[in-house]
Amino acid sequence: MTAAAETAATPRDWAAETEARILDEALPLCVHMGWTRPMALAAGRKAGLTAGETDLLLPHGPRDLAALLSRRHDAAALAALPAPEGLKIRQRIRAAVEARLEAAGADREALRRWAGYLSLPLNLPLALRLVWESADGLWRWAGDTATDENHYSKRAILSAILVSTTAIDLASGREAALAHLDARIQNVMDFEKWKAGLNPADLAREVAGALASIRYGRP
């Protein structure tokens, strides 16, 4: 890499590394401070930034941190997954969701505060976008190449599976979550029948309900 290229890359690298440090500091803080702007500023201070610098890097404060945590879990899940070749679609979906559960499980207490924040009506669009991103990444790992309406329907199905299974994992444990997952995977197998009754409002209600379940620690 040339010196000019290194200089151009440095701001992006610094931003990503600093965001990661702030998120690291935010995870224990949010347990006591909630998923709030004061928590985001406190995390920035612990990472060595002034309040102004934190606001410049994370202009939406807790919303930015919520997105960073979800994407961190997505990246960890994808890194842990093996090559999907040789696995049937049911096995791929199960492996993908289980890897996502494992990644999120590393931050169980913070995840409850994260879910409480995203369950607020104002933040539900962000919650839907993040769970959609998670589903999209896992479908791409599984080899999905659909570009028609199936692209969206499959991601809606997996979004609902992800959020409900995560809620059960946090409330009742991994065994119960995997039993629920196996039952819900049948939705993927019955894709055409399920798609016929697909309603975007149903996904929004399911995501909101599951986030509330995570927040209050009940299935």
Image: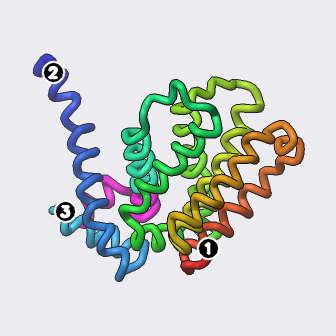
The x and y percentages for residue 218 are: 60, 78
- Residue stretch rendered in magenta on the structure: 51-66
| Numbered label tally | 3
The x and y percentages for residue 135 are: 58, 44
Mark 2 and mark 1 in contact? Answer it, CB < 8 Å.
no
In this view, the residue in front, 68 or 163, is 163
In this view, the residue in front, 28 or 108, is 108
Find disc 2 in the rendering and name its residue.
Answer: 4
Residue 111 located within the stretch drawn in magenta: no
Type of amino acid at the residue the image marks with label 3 = Ala
Q: Work out whether mark 3 precedes mark 1 in sequence or the reverse, and give the earlier one.
A: 3
**Up-down: is 116 above or below 162?**
below
How far is mark 2 from mark 3, CA to CA? 28 Å
The dominant secondary structure in magenta is helix
Q: Quadrant of residue 36?
A: bottom left
In this view, the residue in front, 120 or 180, is 180
* Residue sitting at x 69%, y 48%: 185
Residue 184 in the figure: left or right of residue 11: right
* Of the two numbered discs 2 and 1 in the rendering, the one whose residue sits closer to the viewer: 1
Find disc 1 in the rendering and name its residue.
Answer: 212
Find disc 3 in the rendering and name its residue.
Answer: 47
The x and y percentages for residue 141 are: 51, 32
